Image (cartoon, grey):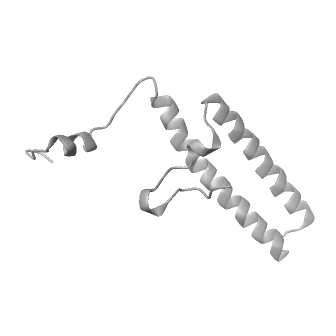
Amino acid sequence: MKGERLTGDEASRRKVELDADTVERDLATLVLTVVELLRQLMERQALRRVDTGELTEDQEERIGMTLMLLEDRMDLLRSRFGLEPEDLNIDLGPLGPLLPRN
């Protein structure tokens, strides 16, 4: 806030570190983390729908192919940015990791 004086520790916690060499990778990590979270949620929902018998065989096949394709694209994007699957699992501190550990 304007006119507020911060101690050294407070100032360093509020400072945003931007490194031109890593900003693209960091942004890709964040975006891929969100996509991976959504992919896992969609996969779980699809499995629930299959288990309850809500889907036709054709729908099951299409969902399965779509999820496999999405997983393949995620692999390609992770390799493009030199990321491993565990790099996308953000630690939420006391809440634990964002994604379930396999």
Can the viewer see residue 82? yes
- Residue occupying the point 48% across, 35% down: 26
Task: Determine the residue located farthest toward the top in the rendered image.
Answer: 21
Task: Determine the residue located farthest toward the right in the rendered image.
Answer: 57
**Looking at the image, is 20 positioned above or below residue 99?**
above
Taking depth in this image into account, of 53 and 99 the one nearest to the observer is 99
Task: Determine the residue located farthest toward the bottom in the rendered image.
Answer: 52
- Residue occupying the point 78% across, 66% down: 47
Task: Determine the residue located farthest toward the left in the rendered image.
Answer: 3
In this rendering, would 48 be left or right of 40? right
Taking depth in this image into account, of 101 and 14 the one nearest to the observer is 101
In this rendering, would 59 be left or right of 44? right
At which x and y percent is residue 33?
A: 57, 47
At which x and y percent is residue 57?
A: 92, 64
**Looking at the image, is 74 positioned above or below residue 43?**
above
At which x and y percent is residue 69?
A: 78, 44
Can the viewer see residue 54? no
- Residue occupying the point 24% across, 39% down: 12
At which x and y percent is residue 4?
A: 10, 47
Report the quarter where the C terminus lies.
bottom right
In this rendering, would 57 be left or right of 14? right
Q: Quadrant of residue 2?
A: top left
- Residue occupying the point 88% across, 57% down: 61
